[in-house]
Amino acid sequence: MPNPYREILGLPGTLAFSAAGLLARFPVSMVGIAIVLMLSSITGSYATAGTVSATFVIAQAVCAPQLARLVDRFGQARVMTPAVTISGLALGGLVVAAVTGAPLWTVYACAVVSGASVGSLGALVRARWTQAVRTPKELHRAYSWESALDESTFVLGPVIATILATSVTPWAGTAVAAVVIVVGGYAFLAQRGTEPPAQPRLEGGAHRGSVMRSGALVGIVVVFLFVGGIFGATDVSIVAFTAEHGRPSLAGVLLGIFSLGSVVAGLLYGAHTWTGPAWRRFVVGVAVLAAGTGLFLLVGSIAVMAAVMFVTGFAISPTIINGNSMVQHLVARQRLTEGLTWLSTGINVGVSVGSSVAGVLIDGHGSTGGFVMVAASGGVAVLTAVGVAPLLRRRDQGDPAHLPGH
């Protein structure tokens, strides 16, 4: 059976920047649960742990689009090399502040600085793919490949973070994430040959204002926000769920299984050539994801939870792939990194709110309270997707104009 991804990974420089990009964004899968495990152990409060984790993500969400705009204007390496350095150092400072018992405000301050400067490496990788591929079919496969890699980090990242936090020391997972932010970022940004060209001066004021003036893009971002709410609430709720069942070390395993389902689905999805509209597949994917995660409330054992999470995970990658693909039709070529980053921002804001609210609910009602937040986020995501579908249907036409030769 032919490998449908061999062709795109054989293009000049693609395998190298994709592999380095995988390492560069690996810490994203570790930071949330690593902070929760570290601070819940040190402070004894899931609410505190969840809000610090949320602070990191909110700072990233607020600042990542601004960094992306600078990247589009001045280039990836010039902007992001100092940024990832600051992010790694600040996350290391968060560890030191937590372990030494420094005032809580210093922990929050470090979370703000680290999150604000980490950017969205996934958007940078996808922007490189638009320069490397030649056809919409190749771009579909490239985005599917990157989505599968994203999810593979969420298979391994939570497991590694949990093992480090429970078997080594509570702060080990966060410390390792801080190091990998810098090392991975440098490895990716050093590959200048595949970096999209900077465009500091563009005709028609293409860098004026925000890409969020597009109603269709706003709609996708809002849907992604509530999908992020599912993810954030699930992260914290699974930590509490496994602790209630006397197996806290299995939290990372369950989250990894959730992402494993997404990895498999992403690879299968990218290998198939789809003819129907992406907007319809997007809405269906959101609905399936919401239905599956809503079942978490009914699960009473770790084994059943693992099965439900694996099957439900099949809805994640296709939903993310279709969302990213639709951005190609909604923003100018010179604003692509910013447009893609807004999707990450939507998810990250949702993750932060979901984890924070779920943490409070868990402190009062156990894991059941957290899973209520998961179900609520899913329900609103579906309603929003259905509501924005007419806008997406009108804009989801033709091939993206971001490929060589277009």
Image (cartoon, grey):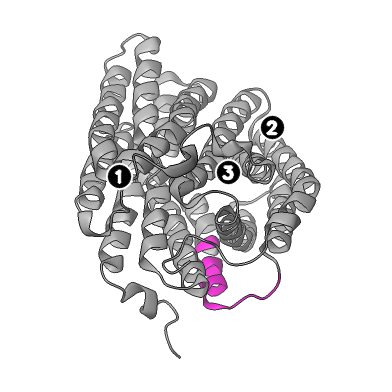
Snapshot quadrant of residue 393: bottom right
Q: Residue at x 33, y 20 (%)?
A: 98
Magenta residues, start to end: 262-276
Looking at the image, residue 326 lies above or below residue 356 = below
Please tell me the numbered disc located at residue 341. none
Q: Residue at x 34, y 13 (%)?
A: 106
Q: Which residue is mark 2?
A: 369
- 331 vs 395, left or right, is left
Query: Could you give the CA–CA distance between mark 2 and mark 1, rounded to whole angstroms?
Result: 42 Å
Q: Which residue is mark 1?
A: 76
Of all residues, the one furthest to the front in this rendering is 203
Query: Could you give the CA–CA distance between mark 2 and mark 3, rounded to whole angstroms?
Result: 15 Å
Q: Are circles 2 and 3 on residues that touch, CB within 8 Å?
A: no
Q: Is residue 34 visible?
A: no
Disc 3 crowd, CA 10 A, few/some/many (<14, 14-19, 20+): many
- 143 vs 315, left or right, is left
Amino acid type assigned to the residue bearing label 3 in the image: Phe
Quarter of the image where the N terminus is located: bottom left
Disc 2 crowd, CA 10 A, few/some/many (<14, 14-19, 20+): many
Of circles 3 and 1, the one toward us is 1
Snapshot quadrant of residue 308: bottom right
